[in-house]
Image (tube, helix red, strand yellow):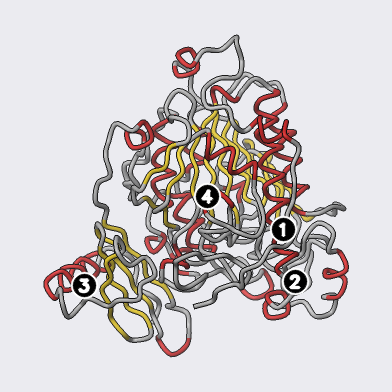
Amino acid sequence: MDKRKSGVFGRREFIGATVASTLLATGGSSLLSARSAASRRPNVVFILADDLGWGDLSVYGEPNFRTPNLDGLAQSGVRFTNAYSGQTVCTPTRVSFFTGRYPARLPIGLKEPLGSLKQVGDSVGLPPDFPTIASLLKAKGYDTALFGKWHCGYPPTYGPELNGFDEYFGNLSGGTDYFRHVDTDGEPDLWQGQGQGNNTFLNKVERAGYSTDLYTQQAVDFISRRRESPFYLSLHYNAPHWPFEGPDDEAISNSLIGKDGVQSWLNSGSPESYAALVGRLDDGVGRVLKALDDAGLADNTLVIFASDNGGERFSYFGPLSGKKGDLLEGGIRVPTIVRWPGVTPANKVSEQAIITMDLTATILAATGTQPDPRYPLDGHNLRTVLKGEKSVYPRTLFWRFGGEQSGGNIQKAVRSGEWKYLLRGGNESLYNLLTDEGEQNDLKQQYPRIFQQLRTKLQQWESQVLPYPA
């Protein structure tokens, strides 16, 4: 288990006005009541962090720095303590969000994660003709945009502009240097695209600035436009993914020139730079929420914040074991916050188990958008849970990871109610997450019937998704 030493570092103070802007639950504009807002199709802002661990926000227990804007968002909506990512690494989780289905239903979802452009070219990606949350909302009259990380396939065959996004600005690969905007091969990785009608393009661009700030500004500008249609904005930060470079750490970026690569990027930085990374992410969320307030749109905008998988070497894991790349709780349990004025009460904490695909189903239902009947959603609409009309109910959720790793060291997991089956390192275990969040006490001998039931459920699920390539 990768735990971080305790201690206080990088403590940051934020302007009260910015924090206050995030504390709005259903109030704000005197010209728009919650009732009138609910009668219109809501705007949607979906914010996805990259490798942000379950405990990396102060509202989730982070002891070493504060995240006041995200804490404020939680205080104005619903915070989930049992939220899971669709997978324990980047690409499959993004596939699960875009499609609302388990990632293993598509070949791109078996890339764990997708390699760089130089490594894989345009050999696999999210098919342009596959219905996504963006293409479905676009067909319903929504303006759509994605700013930030894509990581679901490279041009010319694949790209966000081909999957329903009117606008795109960001990095296509799994990781990008925050200052130089290059991928792990040292190749330029900042792109801009448009996908409206026949005017579809995606080009590399040059832009000075810190990635988090660039993506935030794109989102603020998009929100601030005058428009006649509702909008769906996906803001997919690359933060706090390695290289661990805070906004004042350009020297770290320069030191990596000629040494770019996964291992050197992973070994970069310090706990202080990680605190600065998360802090700037929190600042960005505060700016986006303020832009909604300033535009008079906060009362009619569904805001969701989540992470694509568990944390990395500098994350705070609290009671959880494991990290990114594990199907232990620390690798798949993530912070998730939902604010939906007129629907979500303020400052509610939910213990309901949810997964990435539920966010897709909820957004589609909130906007009155039907999924494609050829591809039924695996996620649940969370509206009744968000409103507090439905008590916690048991879910059965599945994961499988490691098919591309040498040695056949595949991990598998099922959460069903309070129970979790785990295959890891060739060993099978059964845990009761209600009493053992840290997965320390294997109960398969004491509860053989439950153990076998979960194994059987996993086998049934695997028969319905794609096998790993031989």
User: Which three-letter amino acid code belongs to the residue tagged 3?
Assistant: Arg
Residue 175: x and y in percent read 67, 65
Residue 224: x and y in percent read 72, 27
Of callouts 4 and 3, the N-terminal one: 4
Residue 287: x and y in percent read 71, 37
Of the residues tagged 1 and 4, which is closer to the observer? 1
Q: What residue is shown with label 4?
A: 306
In the structure shown, which secondary structural element does the residue marked by tag 3 occupy?
helix
Circles 2, 1 touching at the beta carbon (< 8 Å):
yes
What whole-number distance in Å separates the C-alpha atoms at marks 1 and 4?
16 Å
From this view, report whether residue 56 is shown above or below residue 135. Answer: below
Q: What residue is shown with label 2?
A: 269
Q: What residue is shown with label 1?
A: 277
In the structure shown, which secondary structural element does the residue marked by tag 2 occupy?
loop
Question: Farthest left residue?
Answer: 449
* Badge 3 density bin: few <14, some 14–19, many ≥20, Cα 10 Å: some
